[in-house]
Image (cartoon, rainbow, N blue to C red):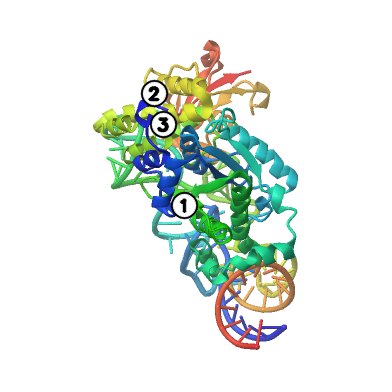
Amino acid sequence: MNNETQNMSVYDILKQRELIKQITFEDEFKKMVEGEKTAIYLGIDPTADSIHIGHFIPLMLMSYFQKCGHTPIILVGGGTAMIGDPSGKTDMRKMLTAEDIQKNVDNIIKQVSRFVSFEGENAAIIANNADWILDLNYMDFIRTYGVHFNVNRMLAADCYKQRMDKGLTFFELNYMLMQSYDFLQLFENKGCRIQIGGDDQWSNMLSGVELIRKIHKNGSFCLTCPLLLNSEGKKMGKTVSGALWLDPKRTSPYEFYQYWRNIADSEVRDVLRMLTFLPMEEVNRLSNLEGDKINEAKKIAAFEITKLIHGEENALSAKKTSEDLFENQNDSKNMPAIIIDKAKLENPNTLSIIEAILFSNNAPSKGQARILVEQGGISIDDQKITDVHYQIPFNDFSKGYVILRKGKKIFVKLEIN
RNA sequence: GGAAGAAUGUCCGAGUGGCUAAAGGAGGCAGACUGUAAAUCUGUUAGCGUAUGCUUACGAUGGUUCGAAUCCAUCUUCUUCCA
């Protein structure tokens, strides 16, 4: 925590960084977090083996809460993953096996530890709702808790509205009850009074708050953070190959860095404010840079975010690679390398440009590779190649490698073996 | 349970016997311009081939036809209306 935020309450920090989208009982909430230390929970569905960029902002919030002395609880939905949240989905999700879920849970915990500490006085806690959901007795549950839910109100909730014309199964409708029950469990057993989540979770979270207030007549809260949107109003974090993952096996630190390095000017402030811990003074200074100066801000944003997710060493190396590639005449030291096996070549004595593109995964088919070449999108060692029949002489590999460049931003080092 | 309708490429969506590898849009990729930005303009966007071309593809399977995304039958899934 930096000096700026040292004496601020978590409420003030979140307000200042505009990290609160919706909140229940705002005044009461402010008073509580300023007056006492509590626990706060964030639910993560273990439906994939890595968290992605959508979890980023809520995790930032968790981090701020922890730094202000509150205890973060990460709830992995080992039980609810068996149902699948229908919010905003047009189709029912497929169900996962118990082993898949466990494997995903393990991975998620590892990644979450980048944001919250599992040590110290208010160490973060991992909870798994499988512990209480799987043993539920249906009759007991609906008699005790089902009576508190009004179906008319549930159906009016935004997250179910889109499902109204598509058809919503009773099975999925239960998701809201499960999530509310989670909060209740954590409230009763871990003293957790706050739930946070993405804005798409608002209705689910709200129903949890209501359930607790009905049963305990006592303060529980939820707040949502804004979704990370790009300048076109779409969710950020989508890449060519799908989502931007926090797992380096799925998205390399270099790609990750590049994603943030390439954001639009108008996104700089949002990214700095929501995804880094830089003091607001600095955020404001950087995001007010004009013209090409704003590239400085993008570099800092990319570095800070990469450091947070992948650690300082990886961030430095990603930054170095980027500078080498874009600013220092394609220094190849840190470039991703592809080793081509001579034995796999169509003709073992020569490497065609088309094959080179395919082996380096720069095109899905020969036809696409040919188009790339024809349109002038491919260079070898800074030499633009426009002849689809071009053969890369093995002599070019005498220095050990050849640099294949696709478009402006994609570089691959080819080695031959 | 009964009736009507729908299913097209990454997505949306036109197409009702040959001119259809399938209009148009979105998205993707590349080029120009730039600041590794946005906007704009241009090209491109099933696979294989240098190419005439060949192969696969309009929910699935069979059929009619010289010829089917288009017609027929059966099946699957979804939507709407009635009970």
| Residue A308 in sight here | yes
Distance CA(mark 1)–CA(mark 3): 21 Å
Q: Quadrant of the C terminus of chain A?
A: top right
Chain ID of residue with mark 1:
A
Whole-percent x and y of residue A313? 51, 20
Whole-percent x and y of residue A255? 49, 31
Whole-percent x and y of residue A180? 59, 56
| Residue A96 in sight here | no
Q: Quadrant of the N terminus of chain A?
A: top left
Callout 1 touching callout 3 (CB < 8 Å)? no
Give the numbered dot on residue A199: 1
Q: Nearer the viewer, mark 2 or mark 1?
A: 1
Q: Which amino acid does label 2 sit on?
A: Phe
Name which quarter of the figure residue A381 lies in: top left
Q: Which amino acid does label 3 sit on?
A: Phe
Name which quarter of the figure residue A245 lies in: top right
Depth order, front residue of A16/A321: A16
Q: Name the residue under label 2.
A: A326
Q: Which of marks 3 and 2 is in front?
A: 3
Name which quarter of the figure residue A52 lies in: top right
Distance CA(mark 2)–CA(mark 1): 37 Å
